[in-house]
Image (spheres, rainbow, N blue to C red):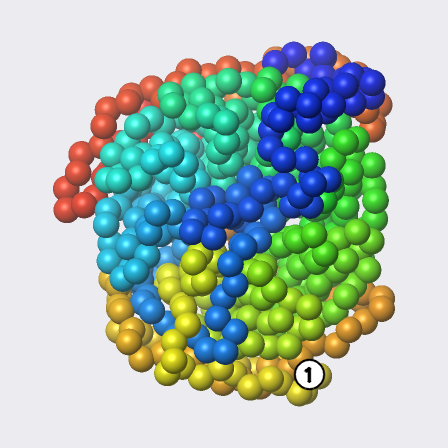
C-alpha cells in the first residue's frame, strides 16, 4: 500500500460513507444501532466481545447469587483474556499454550503449544481459532482439534489480539505495523506502518480499521486496502484497544484519561480527566462508558459528554469492565464483582486467588474470569451461594481472598458443586459531578519494555500528505511478506498440538 495516496478528501470520504450505507456494507449504521455490533449472548468470539471492542453482552448475569462452576489451573502462569464459542472456552497462557476447555465442565478438550507465551486473546470465527504468540507468529488452528491450518510470522512477538471479520485477520505488530492477513491462507493482504508498537486489538466497524499505537496516535484505515483516512496524535501513551460505538472512537490514555473522537474525521468530542489504569480496556454502551482507574476505582462516564456519572471503589486494582444487560462486572486484584450499571449498587462479590486481576468474558449468563496468577474461573448463578450485602461505607475495605482450590499443575480442572462466594463489605460508590485524577498504579504488564523494542525489518519509506485531520508528513512502510512458510500440520498427542519453531532468524 502506497501511503503517499493515503490522504482522502472530505468529499470523497463522505461519498464513500454514503455508498456504504446505501449498499448495506460493513454492518448496521450506528445511527440506527448505537453500538455497531455485540456478542450474541451465546458467544464471546474475540477480545472485548466482538469487532467493536465494546465489551457489551446482551444477556445479564446473576444479580442475587453466584457460585464457582469450575476452575482450571496452570502452575503460576498468567492467562490471557478468554474467548467462548459453541460451548468451548479458548484461552492462551504464559506457558506458550492455547487451551480449549469445555465451557460446562472445564475439562480440557485439546491444547496447542507454540513454545512461547500466548499473551493475548484469541479470535474464534467459522471453526478456526486465530491467535498470536511471542514466537512472532500469528496462528490459525482448527477449533475442533487444534490442528494447525497456517502460521504467518510478523518478525517480532505478537502482543495484539487479532480481530477477524470479512475473511480478514487484522492484528497490530510490535514493529509498528497494522497487518491485514487472509483468514484462509495467512497471506498478507496489506500492512500499514504507524512507526510505534501496537498492543491493543484493532476495532473494525463499517469498513474502517481503528488502531492505536503506544505513543498515542489513533488511525482510521480502509479495511480493504489499508489506505489512511485520518490520524490523530493524542500525545499520550496508549496500551489498550480503541472502542467504537455511538459514531465515536473511545481511547483510554495514560495522560489525558479517556478521549472521544468522531469516527468520520477523528475530531475530538471530549476528554475526561480521570486516572486510568493504562492496560485496562473500556466497556461502552449507548449511555454508559466504564474504565478502570488507579487504586481500584471504576469510573462510569456519559459516553456523549464525558461527564462522570459515578465512581465505584472496587478495592485494590481493577480491570476489564464488562456490561451485561444492566449489570456491570469488573475484575479486581482478588475478586470478581457485579454492580448495578445504573446505580452502582453491588449485586455480589466473588473471591478469587490473590493477584489474579482477571479479564472477563460473559456468555449465556455465566462469567469466565481468566486470572494473571494461573486460574480460570467459571461462575454462574446458584441457589446455595450467598450474595454479598450492599456495602454502606464510602471507603474501600480490604477483601479477604478465597482459599486456593484443589486443582493444580499444567491444566487441571476442578468442578465445584458448593459455591464459594464470600460476602464483602466493599463500599458503594458515590456520584461526583467532576472526575478526579489520582496517580495511576503500576499495572501488571505483559508487554515488552517500550524503550528497547527493535524494529527489525527492512522498510520502504514513502512520503505522503497528511490526513483529513492533521497535515503533517508521515513515514509509512509497505512490506508484503510471504504466507506461513512451513504449513505442516501439527501432530496430535495426548490432545496436544505442538507448533514447530520458526525456521528463520527473526528476533522473538
From what the image shows, is residue 127 above or below residue 388? above
Pick the quarter of the image with the N terminus. top right
Identify whether 302 is placed above or below 21: below
Viewer-closest of 275 and 421: 421
Regarding residue 427, the answer to whether it shows in the image is yes
Q: Residue at x 72, y 17 (%)?
A: 6
Query: Label 1: which residue?
Result: 395
Q: Position of residue 247 (x, y in %)?
A: 73, 40
Quarter of the image for residue 473 reads top right
Task: Work out whether residue 215 or residue 431 is closer to the camera in this orientation and state it.
Answer: 431
Counting from the top left corner in percent of width and height, residue 126 is at: 38, 34
Q: Is residue 350 left or right of residue 12?
A: left
Secondary structure, mark 1, is loop
User: Seen from this angle, which residue lies furthest left?
Assistant: 493
Residue 96, quarter of picture = top left
The residue positioned 24% from the left and 54% from the top of the image is: 108
Amino acid at each position: 500500500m502506497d501511503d503517499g495516496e493515503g490522504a482522502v478528501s472530505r468529499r470523497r470520504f463522505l461519498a464513500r460513507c454514503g455508498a456504504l450505507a446505501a449498499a448495506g456494507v460493513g454492518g448496521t449504521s450506528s445511527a440506527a444501532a448505537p453500538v455497531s455490533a455485540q456478542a450474541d449472548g451465546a458467544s464471546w468470539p474475540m477480545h472485548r466481545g466482538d469487532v467493536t471492542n465494546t465489551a457489551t453482552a446482551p444477556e445479564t448475569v446473576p444479580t442475587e447469587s453466584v457460585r464457582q462452576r469450575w476452575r482450571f489451573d496452570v502452575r503460576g502462569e498468567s492467562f490471557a483474556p478468554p474467548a467462548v464459542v459453541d460451548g468451548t472456552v479458548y484461552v492462551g497462557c504464559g506457558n506458550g499454550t492455547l487451551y480449549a476447555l469445555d465451557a460446562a465442565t472445564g475439562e480440557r478438550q485439546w491444547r496447542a503449544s507454540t513454545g512461547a507465551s500466548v499473551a493475548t486473546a484469541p479470535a474464534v470465527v467459522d471453526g478456526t481459532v486465530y491467535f498470536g504468540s511471542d514466537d512472532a507468529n500469528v496462528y490459525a488452528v482448527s477449533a475442533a482439534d487444534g490442528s494447525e491450518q497456517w502460521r504467518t510470522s510478523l518478525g517480532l512477538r505478537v502482543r495484539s489480539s487479532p480481530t477477524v471479520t470479512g475473511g480478514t485477520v487484522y492484528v497490530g505488530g510490535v514493529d509498528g505495523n497494522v497487518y491485514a492477513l487472509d483468514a484462509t491462507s495467512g497471506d498478507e493482504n496489506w500492512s500499514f506502518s504507524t512507526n510505534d508498537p501496537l498492543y491493543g486489538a484493532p476495532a473494525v466497524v463499517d469498513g474502517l480499521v481503528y488502531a492505536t499505537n503506544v505513543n498515542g496516535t489513533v488511525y482510521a484505515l480502509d479495511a480493504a486496502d489499508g489506505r489512511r483516512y485520518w490520524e490523530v496524535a493524542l500525545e499520550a501513551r496508549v496500551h489498550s484497544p480503541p472502542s467504537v460505538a455511538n459514531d465515536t472512537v473511545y481511547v483510554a490514555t495514560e495522560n489525558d484519561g479517556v478521549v472521544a473522537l468522531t469516527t468520520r474525521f477523528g475530531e475530538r468530542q471530549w476528554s475526561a480527566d480521570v486516572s486510568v489504569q493504562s492496560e485496562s480496556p473500556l466497556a461502552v454502551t449507548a449511555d454508559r462508558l466504564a474504565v478502570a482507574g488507579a487504586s481500584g476505582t471504576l469510573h462510569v462516564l456519559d459516553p456523549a459528554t464525558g461527564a462522570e456519572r459515578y465512581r465505584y471503589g472496587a478495592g485494590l486494582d481493577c480491570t476489564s469492565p464488562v456490561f451485561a444487560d444492566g449489570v456491570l462486572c469488573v475484575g479486581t486484584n482478588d475478586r470478581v464483582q457485579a454492580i448495578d450499571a445504573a446505580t452502582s449498587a453491588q449485586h455480589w462479590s466473588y473471591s478469587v486467588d490473590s493477584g489474579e486481576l482477571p479479564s472477563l468474558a460473559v456468555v449465556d449468563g455465566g462469567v469466565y474470569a481468566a486470572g494473571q496468577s494461573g486460574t480460570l474461573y467459571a461462575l454462574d448463578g446458584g441457589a446455595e451461594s450467598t450474595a454479598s450485602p450492599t456495602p454502606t461505607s464510602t471507603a474501600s475495605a480490604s477483601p479477604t481472598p478465597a482459599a486456593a482450590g484443589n486443582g493444580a499443575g499444567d491444566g487441571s480442572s476442578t468442578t465445584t458443586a458448593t459455591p464459594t462466594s464470600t460476602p464483602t463489605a466493599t463500599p458503594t460508590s458515590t456520584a461526583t459531578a467532576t472526575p478526579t485524577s489520582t496517580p495511576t498504579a503500576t499495572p501488571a504488564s505483559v508487554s515488552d519494555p517500550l524503550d528497547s523494542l527493535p524494529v527489525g525489518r527492512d522498510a520502504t519509506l514513502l512520503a505522503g500528505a497528511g490526513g483529513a485531520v492533521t497535515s503533517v508528513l508521515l513515514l509509512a512502510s509497505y512490506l508484503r511478506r510471504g504466507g506461513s512458510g512451513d504449513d505442516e500440520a501439527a501432530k496430535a498427542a495426548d490432545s496436544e498440538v505442538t507448533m514447530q519453531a520458526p525456521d528463520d532468524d527473526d528476533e522473538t
